[in-house]
Image (cartoon, helix red, strand yellow):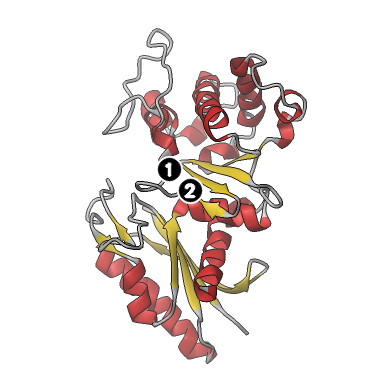
Amino acid sequence: MVLYGAIEAGGTKFVCAVASGPDDILSEVTIATKGPAETLKEVVGYFKDYQEKSGEQINAVGIGCFGPVDLRKESGTYGYITSTPKEGWQDTEVAGFFERELKVPVGFDTDVNAAAYGEYLWGAGTGLEVVIYLTVGTGIGGGLYVHGKPVHGLIHPEMGHVIVRQDKNKDPFEGCCPYHGGCLEGLASGRAVDLRWDCHAAELAEDHAAWELEADYLAQGLINYILTVSPERIILGGGLMHKKQLFPMIRKKVQEKLNGYILIPAIQEEIDNYIVSPGLGEKSGICGAIGLAAGALAE
């Protein structure tokens, strides 16, 4: 049996799994994100321990990693976390470390690209050519798959940092992005909600004014993506999207803000099937990492 190691590497936790496929996860563990040396050693230890106890060999590893990361394979820092705001993790080698320690091929991409890949292969993006996965949590990030390939360029898409309009009379909050202030992440991330209202987002009632504002900013972001890359489906995941009242609010605002410019049934008549929650639930990232591992083994 071919076994894959899968890593969903986040700034708060690393979710690690051993699987033969998305429907056959044999082992899973969550490891708190500490310093890079300690965390990576602990993750490698998990896989080595699994191999020793099971007597089975992991054939490849897939990693969806927080970033920014270097995805240029010709680069001397390919597979590194680069200019991350996560303290202590700047210029950390990730992909090469696991390749050396486990002596297997490693597939590597951003955490949101991995989640997008999982949804493209087995979730809400199955059978489509252009799919966006946007995670709305502590931060905001997006992954874009076109014809089965993730979009990479100078680095990778940073969809959370598009600029949106802000009415300072309604929302005087300065934004929490240290680079751009009032970008989408700066105004609509979980951290922005917490700071703006001086409490955790989970504590806010469903009819709180926060959600109308949140839906407006997210709708603006989605319109930017609709008008630039023309996705066939937009998948919204992350902690804030557990607030299910946001989905109908966002869909309505997208339609209002497009104002009839995109005359497509998917948006005008079937928007409930156009802006959707992840088909894989909380498993988008780890399933995408399984897909990355399978791809690395096939190369």
Q: Which residue is tagged 1?
A: 157
Answer above or below: position of 150 versus 204. Answer: below
The 10 Å Cα crowd at callout 1, few under 14, some 14 to 19, many 20 or more, is: some
Label 2: element kind: loop
Measured from the top left, where is residue 212 in percent x and y?
55, 20
Task: State the quadrant of the N terminus.
Answer: bottom right
Q: Where in the figure is residue 158, as x and y percent of width and height?
A: 40, 40
**Image position of 93 (left or right of 202):** left
Between 42 and 235, the residue placed more toward the observer is 235
Question: What amino acid type is highlighted by mark number 2?
Answer: Val
Residue 66 image position (x, y, % from top left):
38, 53
**Label 2, residues with CA under 10 Å away: few <14, some 14-19, many ≥20:** some
> Horizontal and vertical percent for residue 59?
51, 81
Q: Residue at x 38, y 24 (%)?
A: 196
In the rendered image, which quarter is residue 295 located in?
A: bottom right
Q: Nearer the viewer, residue 212 or 109?
A: 109
Between residues 210 and 63, which one lies in front from this camera angle? 63
Residue at the spot of label 2? 151
Question: Quick check: can you spot residue 161?
Answer: yes
- Please, what is the three-letter code of the amino acid marked with disc 1? Pro
- The residue shown at (35%, 14%) is 172
Q: Residue furthest top?
A: 169
Q: Mark 2 touching mark 1, by CB under 8 A?
A: yes
Looking at the image, which residue is at 22% across and 55% down?
A: 88
Q: What element does badge 1 sit on?
A: loop
Q: Mark 2 or mark 1, which is nearer to you?
A: 2
Number of residue marks: 2
Q: CA distance from mark 2 to mark 1?
A: 7 Å
Residue 185 higher or lower than 79, as above or below = above
